[in-house]
Image (spheres, rainbow, N blue to C red):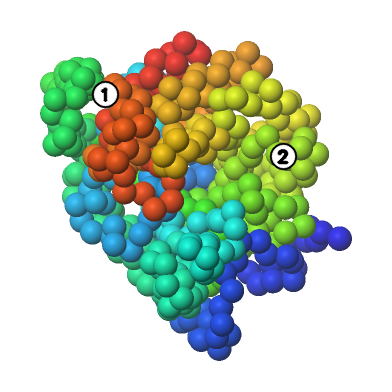
Amino acid sequence: MRSTDNNAWQPTSWQVRKAQQQPVYDDAAQLERAVADLARLPPIVVSWEIEKLRSHLAAAQRGEAFLLQGGDCAETFADCESDHLAKQLKVLLQMSLVLLQAMKRPVIRVGRFAGQYAKPRSADTETRNGVSLPAYRGDLVNRPEFSAEARRADPQLLLRGYERAALTLNFIRALVDGGFADLHHPEYWDLGFMRDAPLREAYERIVHSIGDALDFFESLTGQRVGDANHVEFFASHEGLHLLYEQAQTRYIARQERWYNLSTHMPWIGMRTAQLDGAHVEYFRGIANPVGVKISAGMSDEWLQELVAVLNPNNQPGRLTLIHRFGVKEIEQHLPRVIEAVRRTGQTVLWTCDPMHGNTETTSAGVKTRRFENIMRELDLSFRIHRELGSILGGVHIELTGEDVTECTGGARGLTDADLQRAYKSQVDPRLNCEQALELAMLIAERSKQST
């Protein structure tokens, strides 16, 4: 029987439940030492940042803000370098600028970074040329090279993951605090390879309109708009590796609650959202705002129980439901789940992940996503929420600031043949900066139609 007594909850409570998608380590003593070392290290985030994000998400529930959550499908340790991180920050800033100008309401910027080092796999093993080895589960667990040593689950990678996450968030904070995101100079956020992009002219019009508005207000009042010098950024990742999450979970006495201090907003994937599973048991006890990915395989009853377990007090900003049905199934299933949650009396933040349900494989065996399907799912999401009197309060996008060719379509009309030019992802295909910016512009248009 599932316990709902939070007074009895501890960060280790999940260990009596069945834990899906966890790596198998061959040295228990080494693993125990690594987890103990991780538990002694300073937290990556702090509780008041988490509470601030929760209040922002509560505003998004009411339609007073919009959540932009995006970043790499899976971070790698090699990507923890300044140029890559600055480009990730730039593309999210560009997208948020477009949304801010169109929606006329705050944009909550949450990156899929500083901890997105573990990935669920459809199989525990991978076979090549008759040789089977453990699957690559992300840099937090093992290494991508196809050898027995590389695929061994290494406990020391938990510590390296913590270090890379801390370095990443420290650099992002330094850029933001140093004025990198100053709305007075959004032209500095441009990316070199977009100089000839079809969307550049439209983006520059938005930049100039915001700049002119700031100049007018400051000339009129004689005061500089302080909030335009600094924007808030929050971190998120899938809370998949439970020992990693457990080690950074702390009891904050002044709040009288447990917090996962490895990130601001962890989420649960569909593969680990079992009601009697270890992940739901862990997530129910932390005070962070949390997300849950939902798709066609989740029944109404399952979803309703998840809502009750994860947010028993109906706390505003606590629970985000990230629907990811795919363009072929969204019209059948999104109305169903909206009504199922409505029957609980709970208020949640609805966001759309148009990426995961639209993954396909080309005739050459390359995993990709079609831009038109991504946009179509978003179109349908806005329409369905509007027709049912619900609010689509955000989007969840896998993207990169790099000039990759992993998703087809978009303004430049990338084809299957173009994928080979710059396909870099080791896991899932991502939108490049140009496609991400185009998506933001299209979302801005649809949001106007939904008001």
Given residues 221 and 286, the one toward you in this image is 286
Residue 336, position in %: x, y? 73, 26
Hey, which quadrant is residue 150 in on the image? bottom left
Disc 2 + disc 1, Cβ < 8 Å: no
SS at mark 1 in the image: loop
- Residue 412 has which mark? 1
Pick out the residue farthest to the top.
Answer: 449
Pick out the residue farthest to the front.
Answer: 129
| Front of the two marks 2 and 1 | 1
Residue 191, position in %: x, y? 17, 36
Q: Is residue 396 above or below residue 8?
A: above
Q: Is residue 10 above or below residue 386?
A: below
- Residue 351 has which mark? none
Given residues 216 and 91, the one toward you in this image is 91
Residue depicted at x 25% and y 40%: 421
Is residue 56 visible in this depiction of the protein? yes
- Residue 298 has which mark? 2
Given residues 138 and 103, the one toward you in this image is 138
Sequence-earlier tag: 2 or 1: 2
Amino acid beneath label 1: Arg
Residue depicted at x 69% and y 71%: 15
Asked if residue 50 lies left or right of residue 196, the reply is right
Residue depicted at x 14% and y 25%: 196
Q: Is residue 425 above or below residue 32?
A: above
Q: CA distance from mark 2 to mark 1?
A: 36 Å
